[in-house]
Image (spheres, coloured by chain):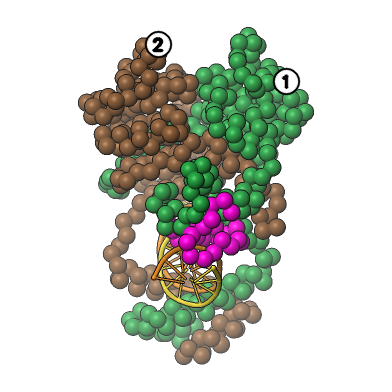
Chain colours: A green, B brown, C yellow, D orange
Amino acid sequence: MYINLLGYVCLFKRKCKNLLHKCRILLNYSVKKITALSKNMTKSKIPKPAIERLCTLYRFLDMCEEEGTTCISSAQIEKQLHIGSHNVRKDISYLNLSCSGSGGYNIKKLKSQIAAQLGFTQPQNICIVGLGRLGTAILAHERIAESEYNLAAGFDSNINKLETIRTRVPVFPSYEIESVVRQMNITLAIIAVPADAAQSVADKLIGAGIRGIVNFAPVVIKTGKSGVFINNVDILGKLNLLTALLKANSSEIYQ
Amino acid sequence: MYINLLGYVCLFKRKCKNLLHKCRILLNYSVKKITALSKNMTKSKIPKPAIERLCTLYRFLDMCEEEGTTCISSAQIEKQLHIGSHNVRKDISYLNLSCSGSGGYNIKKLKSQIAAQLGFTQPQNICIVGLGRLGTAILAHERIAESEYNLAAGFDSNINKLETIRTRVPVFPSYEIESVVRQMNITLAIIAVPADAAQSVADKLIGAGIRGIVNFAPVVIKTGKSGVFINNVDILGKLNLLTALLKANSSEIYQ
DNA sequence: ATTTGTGAACGATTTCACAGCT
DNA sequence: AGCTGTGAAATCGTTCACAAAT
């Protein structure tokens, strides 16, 4: 039988492309079946890149809503966000909802559905560690105040600095991070301290039970604990990435 | 023959997993051959996620070098950066270089090779548009001054502000963006203006021939032109992403 | 003895194509 | 008439396993 199959394949190689496809379908099916039998059905979930795109889409819908638009089609989203319309529809389909029909998506409805599925409905408390130029710039960020996030605390190790900062947000010395984070039930943190302090600050935050960190310090932060997500935003890294993409785009990397 | 094959597959379903694999190999091989014949050999290139990881690695190697380390193995990199050692080696293999042997990679050599392949060797001129709190924070970023990037210009629409800023970097009013960018041969830009000004600033920059933009304004910037890369760093978007990942991680999104 | 380098297997994501609504 | 929603195909990226190198 093995030899027959080999002969069959040789035949395919020459002429029977369609039948070959049929054959592949059959085989793939059986492989899947076997795989499904040998391990538990993996729970379906949204791919991470899709989640990223949905976040971008959510921010974009927010903007559209402010401008007073009520409907948008996947083709329009493609033009604005550079995400293929197929891709947009697929991503939205992961949410298991239906805004269907011609005329495109109802923005208000779609936005609230994304918020519900991705967990943007419950307001969360966030904090900023490091109140230098960058930290205070974020403290003053107009849109955070209007958002679903509540900026609950700021921290800095320099106590003199704390006294001179003018903001509505309560500020604390860094050694109080753990107690304040626990008491105020803060779930997300933004790190804006110098590189050498970043990891120790992150350790404190994670120790206090924080769930996610946006790190602006130019080091890669490690988390020993699973279930804690870290987003490193190193500006030099971003510049490097752009440089590399430009190079790769203009001339092939393999000489 | 079709029916024979079907029967064969049924047999597989029950017991012949190994032979099935063999069969798949044969078929895949033929499919590849056919595909290769029907279209031109696609040029191999580095996957985008691999480029991102290599940028992170580059920054990390930079740090290691400062600390005086000379050698590092893929296993050590795995611990520090949370990138699987397999993955590290694969990414490095895309560069077509050889630092091989036991004892790990020579940091200096590896770093210079990454720089060469990814295009970090030629210093590039960069500029910042928007000299509010965030813009000035970036102007003062210690590491940019030491890096392969030359911070050549800052821009702000508020002329009074330009006079009060204390920095070594030359600053200009925003209406001079196009001429200054051209004259100084600036290739990358950082946008730190309010949301409503971001797109028009980006249009000016792209019009002046800029190749890449890191955008800190909380809107998604569009580029009509291909060959221009944009990196949107929206802090609310990052927070959204963390929230969504937490939700997806803790409880399945499909109820 | 240890660690790299890499083809191939595997798994994940994107794209396609068209049925199904409105 | 036009747009969404979605299985299935195609593509892309990661992991594996082991040969090669020192």
The answer to if A148 sits in the magenta stretch is no
Q: Is residue B59 visible?
A: no
- Residue A86 magenta-highlighted: yes
The chain holding disc 2 is B
Q: CA distance from mark 2 to mark 1?
A: 36 Å
In the image, is residue A146 above or below residue A87?
above
Horizontal side of B113 relative to A140 (left or right) equals left
**Which chain is home to disc 1?**
A
On the image, numbered disc 2 is attached to which residue?
B164
Q: Nearer the viewer, residue B5 or A92?
A: A92
**Residue at the (31%, 33%) spot, across then down:** B205
Secondary structure at badge 1 equals: helix
Residue B166 relative to residue A46: left or right: left
Residue at image position (60%, 14%) is A165
Q: Nearer the viewer, residue B124 or B160?
A: B160
Q: Secondary structure at mark 2?
A: helix
